[in-house]
Amino acid sequence: MNIGFIGLGNMAGAMIGGLRQNKTKDEILGFDLNVKLKESRKKEFGITVCADNRELAQKADYIVLAVKPQFLTPVLEEIDPVLDKKKVIISIVAGKSLGFLSERITNTQKIVRCMPNTAALVGAAITAVTPSEKVSENELKKAVSIIESFGKASVVPERLMDAVTGVSGSSPAYVFMFIEAMADAAVLEGMPRAQAYEFAANAVYGSAKLMIETGKHPGELKDMVTSPAGTTIEGVKALEDGAFRATVMEAVIAAAERSKEL
């Protein structure tokens, strides 16, 4: 099986790295207009670099579209003539629906739309996956296995893709801001900057890990930490006074609405 990557940026690099780490037996092909990046990925992962997008599309069984949204249409126009009905397209391009893709791809309707996040760079992404009707069960399993090379994957109806963008695609930025804000407060209290980042980041990591591994509701876990008349409830009150939860909800909704506009 040949897996081809059109675009070899950070997300494609994370996917290829995950495939290599999982010792895939599939041949990995790649192309990018950036010559230095092509050579870097070839040296780092031992991929086969194609001469252009058309050559890659001809040789690959699964074609991963990993380009910026503004470059997607010309890429599809370039590769469509050499596609056939057996090829499966995997798109990680933000905001581009199955309908958008199917209108511009005439020679195959086997399309899988995905929305990963930047945690893919450390093998910890959560990726939403939506297949078109023409994708078979086995083809979907293969596509999911490719996506799971850099984290977890969950199949969702396409109508939820904009919500996914808000709650996972864009949310790492919110989490980083939260970590930075907590660290700033610790610095204000006298903690050295590097140590403040270490404590704040690991507190977020440990909390998420605790919720995932125990399966407990976040409210229940919050209550476990919040002792009567203690320090934590004072912090919780300060967050509520600042409309913390409402502000986070507005951020997720704003990102989802912007995704609809793309």
Image (cartoon, rainbow, N blue to C red):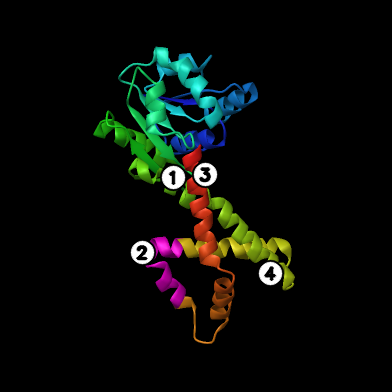
Secondary structure at numbered mark 4: helix
Q: Earlier in the sequence, mark 1 or mark 2?
A: 1
Q: Residue furthest left?
A: 137
Q: Are marks 4 and 1 in contact (CB under 8 Å)?
A: no
Task: Please name the amino acid that badge 4 sits on.
Answer: Ala
For the residues carrying marks 3 and 1, which lies nearer the camera in this image? 3
- Distance, label 4 to label 1, CA atoms, is 35 Å
Give the crowd class for mark 1: few <14, some 14-19, many >=20 residues within 10 Å. many
Quarter occupied by residue 25: top left
Task: Please name the amino acid that badge 3 sits on.
Answer: Arg
- Distance, label 4 to label 2, CA atoms, is 30 Å
**Residue located beneath label 4 in the image:** 186
For the residues carrying marks 2 and 3, which lies nearer the camera in this image? 3
- Distance, label 1 to label 2, CA atoms, is 25 Å
- Range covered by the magenta-colored residues: 209-223
Q: Is residue 231 left or right of residue 116?
A: right
As drawn, the label of residue 162 is: 1
Task: Please name the amino acid that badge 1 sits on.
Answer: Asp
The correct choice, above or below, for 207 with respect to 83 in the image is below
- Distance, label 3 to label 1, CA atoms, is 8 Å
Task: Please name the amino acid that badge 2 sits on.
Answer: Gly
**Residue located beneath label 2 in the image:** 215
